[in-house]
Amino acid sequence: MPKDVITTADLAELRRTALGAADPLGIASDLADAVEQGRLAEPDSAGDALTLASEIAEIRSRLDAALRYADRAVAAYPSPDDPKAGIARAVRARILFRTGGRDDEAMAELTALRPLLTEQPDAPAYLSAALETGGRAKTSEEWLSEALDTLLGQRAAAAAEAQAITSTEPVVEVGPPEAPGVTFFLLQQRHRVRRNLNLPHDRNDDLSDRLEAQLVQRAQQSGETDLLFFPQAEFDRLLGEQVALTETYGPDWDAHRARLEKELVRQADAGGTGLHVLRASVAGLTGYADRKDGDPTDRQTRVGYAGELSTRSDARISWPPERNDTCWCGSGLKYKKCCLPRSRG
């Protein structure tokens, strides 16, 4: 049954759960209706709601509906050039590629968004995904490489000065472990694309590996948990396959959620902002371990996997929700009745 009012927390929850619902296309339609009928608690979230509707319809191969929603999503922002409209425009371009015969229009849309690669942390992910949908992985690699060269070039003078003073290899600042900067996301996406293209490892791929190691080292030095969150089915599978991780993540799902909630509260009390957990999977963790010749039970492997997930906006679950909003863990209960009390246990 459609909700009378849809909050931003509802949108975040639907992004995680809509495709597993009995009628995902019905959810997409209700999101569009909510915008039309003024049922959004925050009217400026209309673009986000319509973008989500578009993505749901696209995944269900209802491309005509997906394109209508995407057009409305772009129009919902104050201007197509509004930086917040970038994801909606990239989704629209992705759909144009899939409809056939509109590749030029899709490329024009993405070319207009290209400057955001050096400005927005999410842009490398959504632009490269759209280009790859259009069979343009090589173009994605070229764009990511040029954007990276631009950023690194802007920092070259400062890095050279630091090297002259310290006589050591300059360190590229990537931001704190919970919020890496644009450079890190560019490096990670470029590294991924080049690996998929079977291109030889170059010095920027080495830099990507080095920065990932920096994030791992920082997280280890801080003593913070990796903030990997395994939904219940994934958690049960994890302990079934990696029983040694019981000590790390808890003996059951309740303990797993409680550990995360307590750590998030601790970080918030220490002044942390923009906090989130990272939606993880067993296949993702073991796949990362295989690529790095590591062990899923090793802390460095798990922190590295968390660093990789942090480059994906769809893996980040914002915290905290409002007390009366749906809990971040996906239980379907209100936060105040679910994970909020766990921090006090």
Image: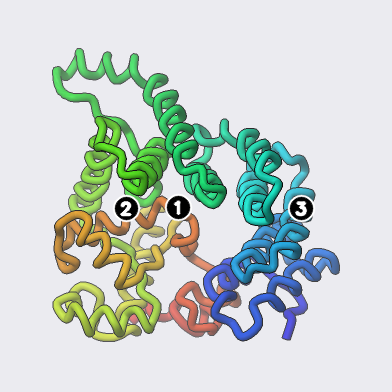
Residue drawn 49% across the image and 45% down it: 128
Residue 36: give x, y in percent of width and height: 84, 65
Number of the label disc, if any, that sits on residue 307 = 2
Query: Hey, what amino acid is under mark 3?
Result: Asp
Residue drawn 23% across the image and 82% down it: 239
Residue 20: give x, y in percent of width and height: 54, 80
Q: Nearer the viewer, residue 40 or 270?
A: 40
Q: Secondary structure at mark 2?
A: helix
The numbered mark, 1 or 2, whose residue comes first in the sequence reads 1
In the rendered image, the vertical position of residue 22 relative to residue 18, given as above or below = below
Furthest residue toward front: 101
Number of the label disc, if any, that sits on residue 273 = 1
Q: Quadrant of the N terminus?
A: bottom right
Q: Nearer the viewer, mark 1 or mark 2?
A: 2
Instruction: Write down the residue under mark 3.
Output: 71
CA–CA distance between discs 1 and 3? 33 Å
Residue 106 horizontal side relative to residue 116, left or right: right
Local crowd size for mark 3, using a 10 Å CA cut-off: few (<14), some (14–19), many (≥20): some
